[in-house]
Amino acid sequence: MTRIDKDTDSLDAQSQYLDTSITRQETECVSRSSHLSPPASEIDGLLSSYDYELPQERIAQTPLSQRDSSRLLVVDSPTYHTHSIFHNLPDLLRSGDLLVLNNTRVIPARLYGYKSTGAPVEVLLLEEQQDNCWLALVKPGRRLKPGAKILFEAHTDRTQSPTPTQLSDGETPPLPTLNATVMARDEATNGRVLQFDVPTGASLAMLLEQYGQIPLPPYITNTQASPEQYQTIYAQTNGAIAAPTAGLHFTDELLQRCQEQGIQQTSITLHVGVGTFRPVEVDDVTAHKMHREWVEVSESTVEQIRETKAKGGRVIAVGTTVVRALESAAASGELQPFRGKTELFIYPGYQWRTVDGLITNFHLPRSSLLMLVSAMIGRERLLDLYKEAIAHEYRFYSFGDAMLILPESRKVVTL
C-alpha cells in the first residue's frame, strides 16, 4: 500500500487564498472556507476515509511513448462508467464544450550543493518572493540556519538543460557560480528563504537551466522519462515545481481534432506548488490548510467561459489545478478575472460555481486532490472507481492513466 511521508523536513512533501471582493487587479488570496458547506457526512470529514490500497506495480514510472494512448475511465452517469482511450476524447465531448488548460511550465527547481563545511544540501524551490529571493524546502533543514551559505553544483545531465553556448574557438564558456544565503525560516512550510547571489550579466532563470533539475515526485523512482515528458505540450509560463499531470495526455493532433469538432480551448495559469501535493495530516480534513499557490485567470478566459455557458456548452477542467483556479476566481459568486494567490481547499460538501466536468489522473490516498474529486462525484463512488481501475490494471499517478468525469455523472451540491 502506498503511503505519504509525513516528515515535513523532507523534500518528499513535494510529491503528491482569496478575498470575496474580486477585482481585475492583483488580489489577495482566496479563503479556503469562502463557500464551503460541512462535509456531506461525518465519514467524509475523516482523513482515514480517503485511504485505499494500491499495488506498487500500478504506480507508473515512465510515461507512454504516445501521450494520448493512455487509458481513460469515463464516468458518464450517476451509476455507470466505461473504459476508453484518451485518444477518443473528442468523441466523448460535445461541440460547444470548452476545455480549460493550465499553461504553467515546470522549472528546474531541484538543486544540489553543499555548505561551507562540505556537507551536502538538497534544495527544492517553491516560489519567488522577490527578485532572486525564493522560498524553498531544504534538506537537511535543521542544520541550515539564517546566515548559512550554500554553494551549488552544475548538474551533468545535459538532457535537462539546453546545450551550453559555444565560444568562437569551439570551447564552452565556464558557468557562472551560483550560491545562496539562508535569510529566514518559514513557519508555514518549515522551509527556508534563500537569497541567491546572481553574477552580473546573468539571470537566475538562466542559471537554473544549468544548475537545476526538473523535480519528479518521490514515488517515481525508476524512470526513463525525459524532462520534456514531464511538461504539457502547451506549457508556457514558468513557475511550477510539478506538472499539471492531467494535461500530459494531450498531443497537438488531439487538440486539433477537438477544435475541428467544435470543442474550444482556453487557459489559466496556476503554478503548481507544495500546496497541491503536501499531504493532509489532520484527522479532521476540514482543518487542513492549503499552502498558497499563484493563479491567473484572464479576462479573455472569463469571457470564453461566459459565452460557453450562455450557449449551453460545458466547462471541462483539465486537471484539479484548473478546478481550483476557476473556483477561486468565482469565490464572490460570479466568475471574474483574477490574479493573485489561492489556498482554496475543495472537499465533499463544496458548492460548485463554474466547473461542469473534469479530466484528472488517479491520485494518492489521503491527498487533497482525492478529496477534490470526491467533492464532484462522491467519495464512496470515487473509491469504487479506483478499485475498478486497479482491477483493470490502470496505471496510477503522474505518468499514469486518466479519468473523465462528465457533467451528467456529477454529485451536485446546490446553493
Image (cartoon, grey):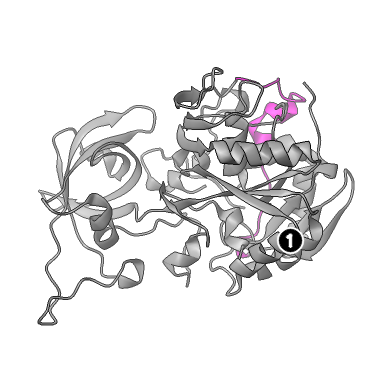
Query: Is residue 50 among the parts visible in the rendering?
Result: no
Please report the bounds of the magenta region as a residue range: 34-57
Q: Nearer the viewer, residue 415 or 373?
A: 415
Horizontal arrangement in the rendering, residue 132 relative to residue 303 (left or right): left
Q: Height in image: 174 above or below 402?
A: below
Q: Residues within 10 Å of mark 1 (few under 14, many from 20)?
A: many
Q: Nearer the viewer, residue 121 or 371?
A: 371
Q: Height in image: 250 above or below 146?
A: below
Q: Height in image: 148 above or below 287?
A: below
Q: Nearer the viewer, residue 29 or 389?
A: 29
Residue 318: say if magenta.
no
Q: Height in image: 251 above or below 136?
A: below
Percent x, y of residue 3? 56, 47
Percent x, y of residue 331? 61, 24
Q: Nearer the viewer, residue 352 or 188?
A: 352
Percent x, y of residue 149? 14, 43
Horizontal arrangement in the rendering, residue 282 relative to residue 274 (left or right): right
Q: How many marks?
A: 1
Q: Amino acid at mark 1?
A: Leu
Horizontal arrangement in the rendering, residue 21 relative to residue 115 (left or right): right
Percent x, y of residue 260? 72, 63
Check disc 1 and report the residue beneath it.
72
